């Protein structure tokens, strides 16, 4: 452990750059603790606070700009991919888009303080056409606030942090074991939260073939598209309703509670659709089902999509 502590003192800037870059690119390896530790070791390390701030901000900007360019080039497709790899499926694209549309690039000032927001917000900025200069300005300020707050906390509680690091160093290999165990617990907690979330959303689904048959009857079901507006640009199932965020919050569905209601999205395991379906069931709707596979399964089966605006 003392060897790792020496490396952190000597090569703290390199550790910060790599950790921040990897985390902001999407890996579940938190960089904030590294920033706090290196901030606490300012007096013992071969770097200054401005150097540490600069390296952290540059690493964050590189990762964020990669997501920005991916969003600019691929639009909704990269957002859907982010949703699928997220460890927090309940904080997906629609929620991020709602915040970004409301506050614009200024939301990037706090993006890194909200788990799961930063990468999606950067890709979203590119997808909706935020000018590069404006994105870089706000993203830089947001990165400075995030990195700077960690360095400040590290320096403020430097004695406590360095005492903890010295204790871990004195423990030798057991100090490394404790750090590894803490990381495993962190990942396990994230996995369990995802598992519990998906378990809570288990319910009967309807297949795309079954939905197609229902649409051909004289009494078609109410279909609700709960994707973000960017996702809807690729087309909707014919006849699908598009609810605003206020309507989704209030769940205003103009149909009889005994009628068939089908909800679809583009999230893994139909997470967003299942969440809305459960809320509708709690409000008395008895025949609510998410579409298995969502819009992707509908398109893959060769069924028609509606590209007209409005619902």
Image (cartoon, helix red, strand yellow):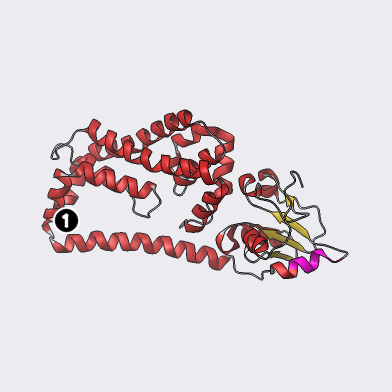
The residue closer to the viewer here, 176 or 165, is: 176
Q: Is residue 199 left or right of residue 289?
A: left
In the depicted structure, whether residue 51 falls above or below residue 34: above
In the depicted structure, whether residue 161 falls above or below residue 260: above
Percent of width and height locating residue 169: 13, 55
Percent of width and height locating residue 166: 14, 51
Q: Is residue 22 left or right of residue 126?
A: left
Q: Is residue 127 visible?
A: yes
Q: What residue is disc 1 on?
A: 168
Q: Residue at x 51, y 33 (%)?
A: 105
In the depicted structure, whether residue 148 falls above or below residue 36: above
- Name the image quarter holding residue 13: top left
Q: Is residue 92 visible?
A: no
* Residue 32 highlighted magenta (yes or no): no
Magenta segment boundaries in residue numbering: 211-217
Main secondary structure along the magenta-highlighted residues: helix
The residue closer to the viewer here, 56 or 1, is: 56
Q: Residue at x 61, y 45 (%)?
A: 230
Q: Residue at x 76, y 55 (%)?
A: 238
């Amino acid at each position: 452990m003392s060897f790792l502590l020496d490396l952190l003192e000597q090569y703290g800037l390199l550790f910060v750059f790599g950790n921040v870059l990897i985390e902001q690119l999407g890996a579940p390896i938190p960089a904030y603790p590294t920033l706090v530790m290196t901030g606490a070791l300012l007096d013992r390390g071969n770097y200054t606070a401005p150097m540490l701030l600069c390296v952290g901000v540059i690493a964050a900007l590189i990762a964020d700009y990669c997501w920005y360019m991916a969003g600019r080039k691929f639009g909704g497709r990269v957002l859907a991919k982010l949703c699928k790899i997220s460890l927090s499926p309940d904080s997906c694209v629609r929620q991020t888009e709602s915040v970004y549309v409301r506050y614009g690039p200024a939301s990037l000032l706090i993006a890194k303080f909200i788990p799961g927001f930063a990468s999606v917000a950067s890709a979203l900025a590119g997808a909706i056409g935020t000018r590069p200069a404006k994105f870089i300005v706000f993203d830089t300020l947001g990165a400075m606030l995030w990195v700077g707050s960690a360095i400040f906390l590290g320096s403020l509680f430097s004695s406590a942090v360095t005492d903890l690091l010295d204790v871990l160093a004195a423990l030798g290999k057991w100090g490394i074991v404790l750090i590894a165990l803490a990381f495993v617990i962190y990942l396990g907690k994230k996995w369990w939260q995802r598992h519990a979330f998906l378990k809570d959303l288990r319910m009967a689904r309807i297949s795309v073939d079954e939905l197609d048959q229902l649409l051909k009857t004289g009494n078609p079901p109410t279909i609700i598209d709960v994707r973000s507006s960017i996702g809807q640009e690729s087309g909707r199932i014919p006849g699908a309703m598009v609810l605003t965020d206020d309507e989704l919050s209030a769940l205003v569905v103009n149909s009889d509670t005994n009628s068939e209601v089908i909800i679809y999205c583009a999230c893994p395991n139909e997470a967003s659709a299942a969440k809305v379906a459960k809320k509708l069931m709690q409000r008395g709707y008895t025949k609510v089902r998410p579409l298995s596979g969502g819009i992707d399964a509908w398109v893959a089966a060769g069924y028609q999509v509606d590209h007209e605006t409005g619902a």
